[in-house]
Amino acid sequence: MTDTVVPLQGPLRLVAQTVPLDPSSLDVPLTHLLPAEGGLAWVRDGDGLVAWGEAARLETSGDGRFREASAWWREISAHAVVRDKVEVAGTGLVAFGSFAFTSSSGATRGRAGGSSVLVVPSVIVGRRGGTTWVTTIRESALAPAPPVRPTDDPVVPQDVAFADGSTSGARWESIVSEAVRRIEAGDLDKVVLARDLVAELSAPLDVRAPLRRLAATYPNCWTFHVDRLFGATPEMLVRRERGLVTSRVLAGTIRRTGDDSRDLALAGSLARSSKDLEEHEYAVRSVADALEPYCSSMNVPEAPFVLHLPNVMHLATDVAGVVDAEHESASALDLAAALHPSAAVGGTPRAEALALIDEIEELDRGRYAAPVGWIDAAGDGEWGIALRSAEYEGARVRLFAGCGIVADSDPEAELAESQAKLVPVRDALTATDDR
């Protein structure tokens, strides 16, 4: 596929100014500040960033999408003037981004389906701990901070009808069976297979409604919205902050029942499951191996912990490292590119898993399971994996879920797991309140 990039028309000089806000003057969730159109979001547990407007934009695709985005952002940052009176993570010049899963993802669906994008908004409101701020970004001149206030209530989706996406449930089970056969034959160790579900609404989606619902229901996940891709991901691909690199790896899942004592027993069985531990080990090793060349030291826990979410539980491991002097200039985006796709979303060995996905999955993933997040002028930032997510165009919404397949995988159980992973966005679209 030919790489495409929207070039700068000469050096673009952006001026970013961050000033503090009185937290007491903004006693609402950040998602309540988003406008009906053009909003961007990255929030977790009340903190994070929301933004709107557009000071600059890059769209790119193909094998060089990460490289071109990184080069574009370095040029933007090099020419920018930043006046930052707050100086915490997420202040100053910031871009939001999301990327296609592979070089060809989304090719048949147009820009909304798969083109990779970086957006520099014109207004950003952030909150971290007890600190709240507003950033304005303009070309060539300072701009006064705009008034920041809650927007009107979103339009809640009505008459939502769900239907099979690219494959039926029965067909997807047969695809899983074929993957298990290939694994048993020794072609590969693990592959992650995805499926989709289509929702048809009676009117174009006001994405603020599901975003508010996701942020309220899944506060320990990162709720995001970038260029008509939204969701609430539990998995941090990579965070870079002042030389410290962290990654949260999830692989191995069990559905919750709603009964606390039963769920506690299920958590114990998950932690002892040889199938899930094997799947998790592949994912952790792929992340550690990808980060190791960039780090002078690393901490990789020997055993995972069980992460409890409202709908499922995951085996989870937090990998941490310190960027070495040789790679000090490697940005959060560069590290995300090195990590993607990890075994948690592709499989292992990587090349064989991606080839099998391309052969049998029967799904265009678009930007599902690829990096989504933000980066600042210093190269710090947070990039999650676009899981528990959906893309939308008008009144049509396409939801995604995926499962790691190993030799012990049971197709019927994997289908049930995928249905559990569709619950967050499905419920967010059918909720009767907007939180």
Image (spheres, rainbow, N blue to C red):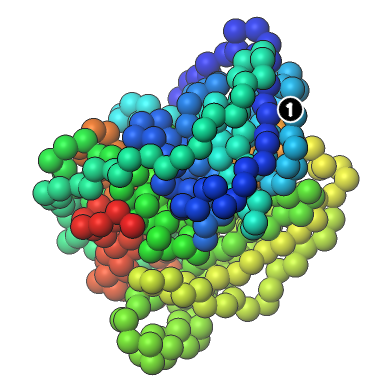
Residue 265 at x, y percent in the picture: 41, 91
Query: Height in image: 332 above or below 63?
Result: below
Q: Which residue ends up furthest to the front in the rendered image?
A: 25
> How many discs mark residues in the rendered view?
1
Residue 428 at x, y percent in the picture: 29, 56
Determine whether, in the image, residue 60 is placed left or right of residue 78.
left
- Is label 1 in a helix, a strand or a loop? strand
> Which residue is rendered at x = 72% and y = 62% of the image?
320
> Which residue is rendered at x = 30% and y = 30% of the image?
109
Q: Is 186 or 337 nearer to us in this picture?
A: 337
Q: Of the residues shown, which amino acid type is indicated by label 1?
A: Val
Quadrant of the image containing the C terminus: bottom left
Quadrant of the rendered image containing residue 19:
top right
Determine whether, in the image, residue 251 is placed left or right of residue 66.
left
Graded by Cα atoms within 10 Å as few (under 14), some (14 to 19) or many (20 or more), the crowding at tag 1 reads some
Query: Height in image: 30 above or below 435?
Result: above
Q: Is 402 or 331 nearer to us in this picture?
A: 331
> Which residue is rendered at x = 64% and y = 66% of the image?
318
Residue 33 at x, y percent in the picture: 44, 42
Q: Is 240 or 38 nearer to us in this picture?
A: 38
Is residue 357 in sight in this rendering?
A: no
Q: Label 1 belongs to which residue?
A: 82
Is residue 41 in sight in this rendering?
A: yes
Determine whether, in the image, residue 397 is placed left or right of residue 311.
left
Query: Height in image: 258 above or below 5?
Result: below
Residue 425 at x, y percent in the picture: 31, 55
> Which residue is rendered at x = 56% and y = 40% of the image?
125
Determine whether, in the image, residue 357 is placed left or right of residue 196.
right
Q: Which residue ends up furthest to the right in the rendered image?
A: 325
